[in-house]
Image (spheres, grey):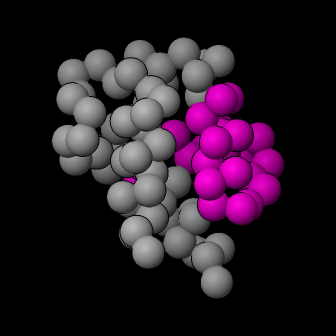
Amino acid sequence: MSSTEERIRALVDANLQIEGRAAGSPLTPDLNIVDAGVSSTDVVAFWRLVCEEFGVDIPAEEFAELLTPSDLIAYLDARSG
């Protein structure tokens, strides 16, 4: 099975345009995706995709605090069984 980071990178590559990042390149762990030019509409769509991909229900209020790859990966890893 792919690591959480690999799965998040695949979702980002397929669904988000991050300024200055080529698809497939490593994610900058502390890059805030909103600061990187991702629209709020795309952030909401990404949230839904993450919930579906990982089989979790992340409350919107919590996801709003997980806008860096490292925060999101740590959150998902902490809840994986």
- Residue 45: within the magenta? yes
| Residue under the image location 54 percent in, 15 percent down | 39
Q: How many marks?
A: 0
On the rendered structure, is 22 left or right of 66? left
Q: Is residue 68 visible?
A: no
| Residue under the image location 40 percent in, 68 percent down | 2
On the rendered structure, is 9 left or right of 73? left
Q: Is residue 64 above or below residue 57?
A: above
- Residue 36: within the magenta? no
Farthest residue in the bottom direction?
A: 81
Q: Which quadrant holds residue 1?
A: bottom left
Magenta: main secondary structure equals: helix
Residue span colored magenta: 44-70
Q: Is residue 13 above or below residue 76?
A: above
On the rendered structure, is 19 left or right of 72? left
Q: Is residue 77 above or below residue 10?
A: below
| Residue under the image location 21 percent in, 22 percent down | 20
Q: Is residue 39 visible?
A: yes
